[in-house]
Amino acid sequence: MGLSAVTGHRLLLTGDLLRPQDEAFRPAQTDNIRWLHRLLRRPITRATGLEVEALAWGPPPASGVRVFDTPGLYAAAGASRDIEGWASLFAARSLPRDATERLAEPFLGVSAVIGFELAEVQKLLLGRMGIPWIDVSIHPYRFGPDLLFAFQTNHDGVLEALTAHHTEDVAFEPWADLLAAMSVKVHLHPPVEERVLVIGQTRIDRALIQDGRLRDLRDLAGPFHQAIGREERILFRPHPYNPEAFGLHETGLPLRRVRETLDNAYLLLAQDALKRVVAVSSSLVAEARFFGKEGIFLGTPPVRVASTRDRLARGLHASILDAWLSADFWRDLLAPLLPVTAKDGQRPTLPPNTLRSTLRQFWGWEELAFQLPVELAVTRMQDRARSGPAPR
């Protein structure tokens, strides 16, 4: 089908237009929206013949990116211009009329929306407007050779197309086995003897929003104590960006029951003594079962992945490895929504750690792939220096 067949359709790429920075009322997701726009605009244009518009809370304005008036929306919604205000709006079931109209206006006449971690209030509004959306999130399985995407949609035709590209969980098991094998060669000091690992998180995360506010361990003390048991000592792995222990010390847990560690989280998951991983919404809970551990979410994670293709349904996410690179993938997804061009059979691939590097987000992988080899090399050099020159 030729490019002229798509005349009259519009595609818009956006993300969470509401989220401010931690310490100031300025955009937190603009760079992520621009990142995804540059990543996907070429294959989507090849698939549809359409230029892909982007919508973000500016500044900075950029080529092909429209600016949304987020401060005006906060004012219309009567929300405070801060993180607490964002949390109150994130999953709101309804907004004042003026706020609803402001949020809806940029999407009028749009054929489909592609989002980067859309706020739930955006998904709800788009659904009420009858606009199909495809939401792209960073996948919670982060122990492989690179990051991957989790795709979700509100359109049955797109969901059916996603099913054909969904990678089932069994494909990720060898990645976990490689890390488990690596752990044999890396000796933790002191060794892990605890059965329960509790994961700390950053103070601000969309996955922590419940009932319009951010939660931490202190808000879930009841289920937390039930998950960790009554007597045993637990292992606590704090998040490197949150030294305040994520409310752990306000749960009523005696300090004598806590051992804190800064060991790599994936090396911890591979320890035989460990049997259970507990967190509010950390992706490590979803990853735990690949290492033979029980994972317990105290809250509700924003990304829930279907383990097999036949289980993929509305509300769940599909695991997409690298198919998103190809125009054929977007032809499949968008064909139920608008005319697409003819398939070309091209399937690009990327080397390991590509998405990690472009996002500048490694989630502990850099310790295994980069830092650990350097530390081992330094240790060997020091050992050789202490032992003196080799005999001739």
Image (cartoon, grey):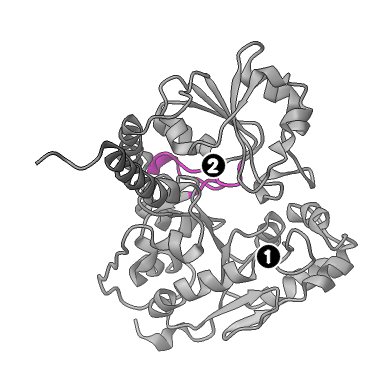
Is the residue 185 above or below the residue 59 in the image? above
- Kindly state the secondary structure of the residue where label 1 is placed: loop
- Magenta stretch, main secondary structure, is loop
Give the labeled residue for mark 1: 28
- Count of marks overlaid on the render: 2
Pointers 1 and 2 in contact (C-beta within 8 Å): no
Q: Is residue 311 magenta?
A: yes
Is the residue 207 above or below the residue 327 in the image? above
The residue positioned farthest toward the right in the image shown: 78
Q: Amino acid at mark 1?
A: Ala
The crowding category of the residue bearing disc 2, from other C-alpha atoms within 10 Å (few below 14, some 14 to 19, many at least 20), is many
Is the residue 92 above or below the residue 177 in the image? below
**Which quadrant of the view contains residue 227?**
top right
Front residue of this view, candidates 256 and 234: 256
Q: Position of residue 98 (x, y in %)?
A: 86, 70
Quadrant where the N terminus lies?
Answer: bottom left
Q: Amino acid at mark 2?
A: Ser
Q: Position of residue 284 (x, y in %)?
A: 52, 38
Q: Which residues are magenta?
A: 301-317
The crowding category of the residue bearing disc 1, from other C-alpha atoms within 10 Å (few below 14, some 14 to 19, many at least 20), is some
Marking on residue 283 = 2
Marking on residue 170 = none
The residue positioned farthest toward the bottom in the image shown: 4
Residue drawn at (74%, 63%) of the image: 20
Front residue of this view, candidates 171 and 27: 27
Q: Position of residue 5 (x, y in %)?
A: 42, 84
Q: Position of residue 351 (x, y in %)?
A: 31, 62
